[in-house]
């Protein structure tokens, strides 16, 4: 054990037992003891919805995070278990009918495919745009949308310890291989980075890269320590929900120490390593194992930043966000983004109008100190970039949304305030119309030209 490892391992793990990672999916849903105790009608609804949207949940979430006395209202239950209203009534009825008459697998799969197609599986031009090339060939498993940051989807990390019911990457979990963005082309990825000195940030994402064995992560990240031609990649971000869904990953898993050691070495070599932790509710931070995982991670010198969407039925309440941010600050996590639920999957179930989102954000901000006010948002990750709703204002008698890009395809668009007509029901950028009688938003022509160039 290296000395740095000893620093964060020295607290006795006496009370924390190593656990194995038992997981249930749509085929084994009925075998979950707590589910078996639910009313028949509710079990049927779950089965119907799980045949369209991805479902996967592990025993830690079931036994330690969900409060089964509070089902179906429990936020962690809604975060992971399918609910009838996640499908449109007509879609639900069609799928329910197949199950009622005991239709065969092929028929269910065919309808599932059709219904998924209607759920905008690839929002924000994910497949057509952002495809990086080396020598004219598309590098699989990379996305390069914003100048300084490359997203990398390692092939071994394209699943998660459990699935969120609102996941915007849900399409890659439902088995349609053609839709998957994945790669094991390490050398191509590193080659692309070497050729692009403007890239300062590598964001490893998924799925969840923390489902990978440490030896795979090491294989991708170690070259950054050794290769001088990769010195411009100063920041390594790792997007994960493992601190919620499987904190044992950082504490008792057989390669947990090896993982922490890898992170510590990256930090020691002068890299900024940021764990981009996905959180939706303070309850995710409430178990001893979740806190121990955070403590150990912080001991390596990495930063933990938090981000997550605002969701109806789960966290559309300023008090929930205030408590989430306060708890994070207490534990040394830096609040980073509040996202607007994306225009995909079961979005009609989870979406919160932008006007209400801005109010929830502000009401939550009011309750926290400056250290909790680092969260930006509510932010829409749309085709042109990340657009933040800064608030609602009245300018010369017109009620407007004040907007700005936090991140944009053209860096010149960033931080320029712009205005949309107030619309109480709008839930996404494409619902918004320019204010003050303008025809278009300032970036629209340029964005259309970019799309045409890529299409
Ligand atoms: C959010 C995001 C990033 C990172 O943006 P930051 O503002 O630097 O956090 C990079 N690429 C894509 C595609 C993103 O959506
Ligand atoms: S952790 Fe992220 S990628 Fe995985 S299911 Fe949840 S939202 Fe989707």
Image (cartoon, helix red, strand yellow):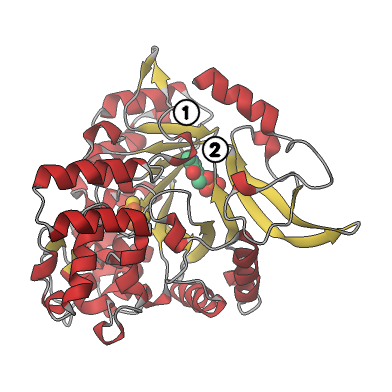
Q: Crowdedness of circle 2 by 10 Å Cα count: few (<14), some, many (20+)? A: some
Label 1 with label 2: CB-CB less than 8 Å: yes
Q: Quadrant of the N terminus?
A: bottom left
Under tag 1, what secondary structure? loop
Q: How many marks?
A: 2
Residue 37 falls in image quadrant = bottom left
Can you identify the residue that label 1 sits on?
A: 129
The numbered mark, 1 or 2, whose residue comes first in the sequence reads 1
Residue 446 falls in image quadrant = top right
The numbered mark at residue 165 is none
Horizontal and vertical percent position of residue 97? 20, 57
Horizontal and vertical percent position of residue 367? 62, 80
| Mark 1 CB lies closer than 8 A to ligand 1 | no
In the picture as drawn, the residue positioned furthest to the right comes out as 396
- Say whether residue 264 is visible: no
| Above or below: residue 3 compared with residue 19 | above
Residue 89 falls in image quadrant = bottom left
Can you identify the residue that label 2 sits on?
A: 383
Under tag 2, what secondary structure? loop
| Mark 2 CB lies closer than 8 A to ligand 1 | no
Horizontal and vertical percent position of residue 138? 36, 20
User: Which of 157 and 363 lies nearest the eye of the viewer?
Assistant: 363
| Above or below: residue 420 compared with residue 231 | below
Name the residue at 74% across, 62% down: 392
Horizontal and vertical percent position of residue 64? 23, 78
**Is 251 displayed left or right of 150 in the figure?**
left
In the picture as drawn, the residue positioned furthest to the bottom comes out as 69
Name the residue at 31% across, 23% down: 188
Name the residue at 69% across, 48% down: 404
């Amino acid at each position: 054990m290296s000395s740095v490892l000893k620093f964060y391992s020295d607290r006795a793990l006496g009370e924390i037992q190593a656990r194995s990672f038992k997981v249930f999916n749509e085929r084994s849903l009925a075998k979950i003891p707590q589910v078996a105790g639910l009313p028949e009608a509710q079990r049927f609804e779950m089965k119907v919805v799980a045949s369209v949207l991805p479902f996967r949940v592990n025993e830690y979430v079931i036994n330690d995070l969900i409060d089964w006395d509070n089902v179906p209202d429990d936020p962690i239950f809604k975060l992971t278990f399918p609910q009838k209203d996640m499908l449109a009534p007509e879609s639900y009825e069609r799928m329910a009918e197949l199950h009622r008459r005991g239709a065969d697998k092929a028929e269910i799969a065919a309808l599932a495919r059709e219904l998924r197609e209607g759920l905008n599986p690839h929002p924000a031009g994910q497949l057509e745009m952002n495809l990086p090339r080396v020598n004219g060939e598309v590098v699989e498993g990379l996305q390069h949308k914003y100048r300084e940051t490359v997203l990398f989807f390692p092939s071994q990390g394209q699943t998660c310890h459990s699935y969120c019911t609102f996941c915007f990457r849900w399409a890659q979990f439902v088995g349609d291989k053609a839709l998957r963005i994945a790669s094991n082309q390490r050398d191509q990825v590193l080659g692309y980075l070497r050729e692009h000195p403007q890239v300062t940030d590598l964001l490893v994402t998924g799925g969840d890269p923390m489902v990978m064995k440490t030896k795979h992560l090491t294989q991708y990240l170690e070259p950054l320590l050794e290769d001088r031609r990769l010195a411009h990649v100063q920041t390594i971000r790792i997007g994960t929900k493992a601190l919620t869904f499987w904190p044992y990953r950082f504490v008792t898993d057989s390669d947990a120490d090896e993982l922490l050691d890898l992170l510590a070495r990256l930090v020691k070599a002068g890299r900024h390593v940021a764990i981009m932790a996905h959180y939706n509710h303070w309850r995710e931070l409430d178990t001893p194992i979740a806190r121990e995982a955070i403590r150990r991670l912080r001991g390596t010198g990495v930063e933990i930043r938090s981000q997550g969407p605002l969701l109806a039925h789960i966290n559309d309440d300023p008090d929930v966000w205030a408590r989430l941010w306060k708890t994070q600050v207490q534990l040394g996590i830096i609040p980073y983004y509040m996202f607007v639920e994306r225009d995909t999957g079961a979005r009609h179930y989870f979406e919160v109008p932008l006007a209400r989102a801005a109010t929830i954000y502000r009401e939550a901000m009011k309750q926290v100190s400056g250290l909790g006010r680092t969260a930006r948002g509510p932010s829409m990750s749309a085709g042109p970039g990340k657009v933040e709703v800064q608030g609602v204002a009245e300018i010369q008698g017109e009620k407007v949304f004040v907007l700005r890009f936090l991140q944009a395809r053209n860096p010149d668009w960033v931080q320029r305030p712009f205005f949309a007509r107030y619309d109480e029901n709008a839930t996404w950028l494409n619902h918004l119309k320019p204010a003050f009688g303008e025809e278009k938003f300032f970036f629209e022509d340029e964005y259309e030209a970019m799309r045409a160039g890529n299409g």
